[in-house]
Amino acid sequence: MESSHNQETPVDSTPSTEPDQAAATDKPVSPLGCASRAIRPLGVEYGRKLATEAARVALDNNGTEVMVIDVCAQSAEFDFFVLATGTSRRQLHAISEQIDDALEKGLEDKRLGIEGYDESRWIVLDYGSVVIHLFDEETREYYDLESLWADGKAVPLSELGLEQRQGEKNDSSDES
């Protein structure tokens, strides 16, 4: 049985003036500044669609401080974070279950994993290209993922066709 790993691939033997220049061109990059479909077979736009739907569901279920962060330039594993805050265990469970329903039934995407559902202070839903973080207020403030992923681009909800309810904080509408 022959393995495809034994096939030789052409190597660019052009000398580089910068040591990291060759490594930087190893991965094709899309115009969005993210790795190409070779790494993201469904494309970055598919992740954006999932993130938009998750944010919409969080808003529809009275989630507050809903934020979408584009991290495709910072991560090879996922493209977007969706963050939302809930005020109770029951609300966090409802948001989580409604997001699952919308993404699995509506968009036919299967959740890869879930963490924190029983504790209900920080629920993480893993959809591959999108990771959804649902927090209670204290936990969100303590871990401050917005600052940890500050190199990512906060996507204004208005760009996604969504709107935070009046009087609710929306960090993703701030332009950096």
Image (tube, rainbow, N blue to C red):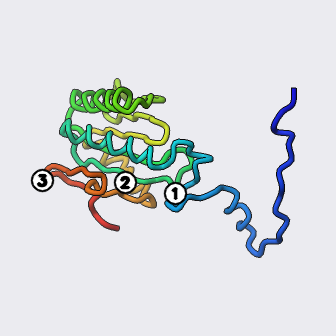
Q: Foreground: 80 or 151?
A: 80
Which three-letter amino acid code belongs to the residue tagged 2?
Glu
Q: Are marks 3 and 2 in contact (CB under 8 Å)?
A: no
The residues tagged by marks 1 and 2 sit, at their Cα atoms, a distance apart of 15 Å
Where does the image place residue 14, in percent across and percent down from the top left?
83, 69
The residues tagged by marks 1 and 3 sit, at their Cα atoms, a distance apart of 32 Å
Q: What residue is pinned by disc 3?
A: 167
Which three-letter amino acid code belongs to the residue tagged 3?
Gly
Question: Who's the residue at 73% across and 73% down the image?
Answer: 18
Q: Residues within 10 Å of mark 3 (few under 14, many from 20)?
A: few
Q: Against 17, is 41 above or below?
A: above
Where does the image place residue 88, in percent across and percent down from the top left?
21, 32
First in sequence: mark 1 or mark 3? 1
In terms of secondary structure, where does tag 1 sit? loop
First in sequence: mark 1 or mark 2? 1
Question: Who's the residue at 39% across and 57% down the image?
Answer: 147
Q: Foreground: 138 or 109?
A: 109
First in sequence: mark 3 or mark 2? 2
Q: What residue is pinned by disc 1?
A: 73
Q: Nearer the viewer, mark 1 or mark 2?
A: 1
Q: Residues within 10 Å of mark 2 (few under 14, many from 20)?
A: many
In terms of secondary structure, where does tag 2 sit? helix
Where does the image place residue 98, in percent across and percent down from the top left?
28, 29
Q: Nearer the viewer, mark 3 or mark 2?
A: 3
Q: Is residue 172 left or right of residue 88?
A: right
For residue 47, which quarter of the picture? top left
For residue 137, which quarter of the picture? top left
Quarter of the figure that contains the N terminus: top right
Q: Is residue 11 left or right of residue 51?
A: right
Q: What residue is pinned by disc 2?
A: 146
Which three-letter amino acid code belongs to the residue tagged 1?
Ala
